[in-house]
Image (cartoon, rainbow, N blue to C red):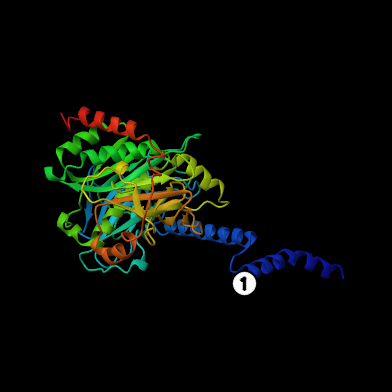
Amino acid sequence: MMRRRWVCTLLAPLCVLFVLLRSGAEEKEPKSTPRLIVRSVVAYSAEAEHLAALAAAGSPRDDNGDGPLHAEGWLALDGVLFLLRAFDDRRVQHLPAVRLLSLVRGLRVPPSLFCRLRFHGHPEVHAAKVLPTEIWSSEWKAPLSNTTFRPFLLTCPYKKSLVQPVTVSISLQKAFETTPRLPVVSWVKSEPSNQVSVAVCVKGLNFPSRSDDISRQIAEWIEINGALGASKFFVYVQKVDEKVQRLLKHYSDRVEVVDELLPPGLLLSDLSELWQKRRFELVSYNDCLYRSIGRHQFVLPLDVDEVLVPVKHFSWQETLADLVATHDRSPASFAVHNFFFFSSAANTSPLDLVFRSSYETTGTYKSFAATDRTLTLFNHYALHTMIPGTQRMEVADQSVAQVNHYRQGCSPLMADDCQSRYLRFTQRDEILLSRVDKVRVLKRVESSLNASRVIS
């Protein structure tokens, strides 16, 4: 009798676990307890993958042979793999890794990639099998060919007992092969702050001629977004007119300009193909994300014809505080609906446009992506999350915020919807003018244009 009671007592927790898992599988919305169980299982899976990648490469070696240090631009390996930059990532303390932004050319990813790490103060070379993540979604069904450049995040795990990786190299064949090295951007530990910091990410600007002078538009855009809450702007540049260069230099306290370089074999003309352009843009967005980790709590990908406007509050910081407070489990990104503001003339100031489409753009958002929860970034939301199982995106209600998207006309890609829906049904919207001081903004714009010798 006593033995039976002992067995029942021992098995009771397993019975409870079985019931919880079963009830969670039968319900459309699992209760909180099963979600915790699922997250712990997923976290264990991530840790197992991390350890397996370390084991696949073997033990550290006392090896003084190193490849040359590659300092700038894209590093090409066998014409198949192209490496841009490497970042130390300790956001998950027990699963540290070096993340490399890369492009893979063609249909196939090299099957066995290994990374080789050097650490400050350690003579040994440490190696691991690379964990690749394509910065893309199969749902988009974009065409592929042998000449397509595809963005990947390469994860190189290392042991949590190690600190400060200095260089990393990638091998396409074996763990300790000597290949050219990249310097690793050091980990920046975030400091506690009462103020939420938001960095804006701008994809590569390509306005090379004098007729493409967008200096006034850029100045207004920086001043408006700065007034709403932007802490920093990462502006990626392909080619811009000299006036724009001078203006961006004038804003160097708030704007970090990054040259958007093309890898060998990819021409600027290749970016006229829509899907290749979209793929390449993701490299800059993710470079912006990894530059911001530890420095800014959120990143916001925006184009220079877009402004994210708080509706319920007066700043991005107040808006984010509201969104975080109203979500028990914060997603990796908070998405905001897009509305078109059409103008009849080029270079019309956003501060002069007060009519927008009555309908939001279907399925199009811009998002505040949390830097502590986002692994890879798409231009509309977080694509992969740091912890598997975290919700990628939560769409904010239109009463909280909106994206004002300023356009002169309809894009050919959406001409039918644009004419029948967005241009046909409009309404007055002066929310931006109630959030920024128009006179103050325009005064600052004129001052910046004069100081940077854009106008005389």
Residue at 24 percent of width and 56 percent of height: 409
Q: Nearer the viewer, residue 114 or 84?
A: 84
Q: Residue at x 43, y 40 (%)?
A: 294
Q: Can you tell which quarter of the image residue 2 is in? A: bottom right
- Residue 7, image x and y in percent? 78, 68
Q: Quadrant of the C terminus?
A: top left
Percent position (x, y) of residue 120? 38, 38
Q: For mark 1, give the secondary structure.
A: helix
The residue lying at 78 percent from left, 64 percent from top is 9
Q: Is residue 87 visible?
A: no
Across and down, in percent, residue 145 comes to 22, 68
Q: What residue occupies the far right of the structure in this picture? A: 1
Image quarter of the N terminus? bottom right
Residue beneath the point at 75% across and 64% down: 10
Asked whether, in this view, residue 46 is left or right of residue 24, the answer is: left
Image side of residue 276 versus residue 155, left or right? left
Residue 305 appears in the picture as rendered? yes
- Residue position marked by numbered label 1 in the rendering: 26
Given residues 229 and 176, the one toward you in this image is 229
- Identify which residue, 129 or 250, lies in the foreground: 250
